[in-house]
Image (cartoon, rainbow, N blue to C red):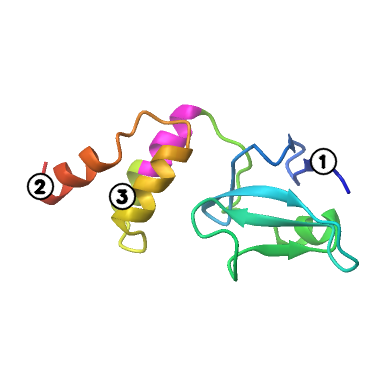
């Protein structure tokens, strides 16, 4: 069971690293499974139907699209989070939880209150 995963962009990640896959933050989780080598777990929705299992790296390469960026800097995650707060697909609870996990300075609840008040 691999403890690291080489992303299609050449970066190597561990289960602790967060990266952008299909426009959402994910982590890699190795699997000791007959059919699947690893899965990608969404940072907020993980642990269920939203996990994406892969039989090997080649399958990930095939599914890696332009919306996937790999690991990002603190500033890039900050920009992503600000943009997500303007996107109706994401709820405040979800984004506040992501803000606590991502390497950003986003205060979570304070941003939610400011947005609700129109600031």
* Residue bounds of the magenta highlight: 74-81
Q: Where is residue 40 in the image (x, y as percent from the top left)?
A: 67, 55
Q: Mark 3 points at which residue?
A: 85
Is-magenta flag for residue 37?
no
Say which mark, if any, is on residue 3: 1
Which secondary structure lies at badge 1? loop
Q: Nearer the viewer, mark 3 or mark 1?
A: 1
Given contact means CB atoms under 8 Å apart, are the residues at marks 3 and 2 in contact?
A: no
For disc 3, the neighbor class at 10 Å (few under 14, some 14 to 19, many from 20) is some
Question: Crowding near pointer 1: few (<14 within 10 Å), some, many (20+)?
Answer: few
The residue pinned by badge 2 equals: 118
Q: Which of marks 3 and 1 is nearer the N terminus?
A: 1
Q: Nearer the viewer, residue 8 or 30?
A: 30
Q: Main secondary structure of the magenta part?
A: helix
Secondary structure of the residue carrying numbered label 3: helix
Judged from the image, the secondary structure of the residue bearing numbered disc 2 is loop
Quarter occupied by residue 67: bottom right
Task: State whether residue 94 is above or below residue 106.
Answer: below
Which mark is first along the chain, 2 or 3? 3
Q: Position of residue 98 (x, y in %)?
A: 43, 45
């Amino acid at each position: 069971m691999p403890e690291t995963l080489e992303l299609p962009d050449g970066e190597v990640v561990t289960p602790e690293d967060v990266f952008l896959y299909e426009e959402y933050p994910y982590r890699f989780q190795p699997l000791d499974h007959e059919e699947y080598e690893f899965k990608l777990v969404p940072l907020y929705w993980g642990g269920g139907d939203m996990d994406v299992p892969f039989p090997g790296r080649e399958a990930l390469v095939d599914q890696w699209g332009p919306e996937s960026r790999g690991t990002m800097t603190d500033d890039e995650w900050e920009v992503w989070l600000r943009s997500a707060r303007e996107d109706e697909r994401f709820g405040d609870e979800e984004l506040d939880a992501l803000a606590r996990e991502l390497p950003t300075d986003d205060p979570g609840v304070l941003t939610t209150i400011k947005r609700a008040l129109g600031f």
